[in-house]
Image: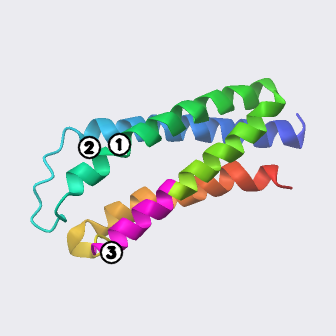
Amino acid sequence: MNLTLSVNAIVAVAQIAMAIGIAHFWWKWFRTEHKEPWLPVGYVEHERVFVFPDSVMSVLMVISAVLLLLGHPLGERLTQICGGMMIFLAVIDTAYFYQHGMFRKDRNGLENWGLVLPMYVMSALMTIPFLL
């Protein structure tokens, strides 16, 4: 197996895992009340907006993963697009959480870091290997 194939396979598996993770996040999020007194006004409305872009990104990640595994040249390009989408969404989440003090320990800070840090790592995984 050559190096390109193994990198593509790693990225593809990570994309599929992340897409499943995003679906699980929203499934769990919609089954939670979000009644914490420290949540900012409009939190639910703000977050609900991201279901659509997260869904589009997840579908595109699965498509690009399949293309990568098939060795189709569009797989790498679409993967890079997904990486850009993911870092954009991660930056928005980071800014929102920071602005509202949601990285503090008493405001689920570790959980919120657990949401954004994997997005930055995944974004790097979906872009850097294909820039070289």
Q: Secondary structure at mark 3?
A: helix
The reply to whether dot 1 and dot 2 touch (C-beta < 8 Å) is: yes
Reading the image, the residue beneath label 2 is 29
Q: Amino acid at mark 3?
A: Gln
The tag on residue 17 is none
How crowded pointer 1 is (Cα within 10 Å; few <14, some 14-19, many 20+) is rated as few
- Asked if residue 64 is positioned above or below residue 123 in the image, the reply reads above
Residue 90 on the magenta span: yes
**In this rendering, position of residue 118 left or right of residue 12:** left
- Name the residue beneath numbered marker 1: 25
Residue 68 picture location, percent across and down: 75, 32
Residue at horizontal 78 percent and vertical 52 percent from the top: 129
* Residue 37 rendering spot, x and y as whole percentages: 9, 65
**Which image quadrant for residue 128?**
bottom right
Q: Give the mark nearest the N terminus, 1 or 3.
A: 1
- x then y, percent, for residue 96: 35, 66
* Measured Cα–Cα span from mark 3 to mark 2: 21 Å
Question: In this picture, is 109 found above or below 120?
Answer: below
Distance CA(mark 1)–CA(mark 3): 22 Å
Which residues make up the magenta segment? Answer: 89-101
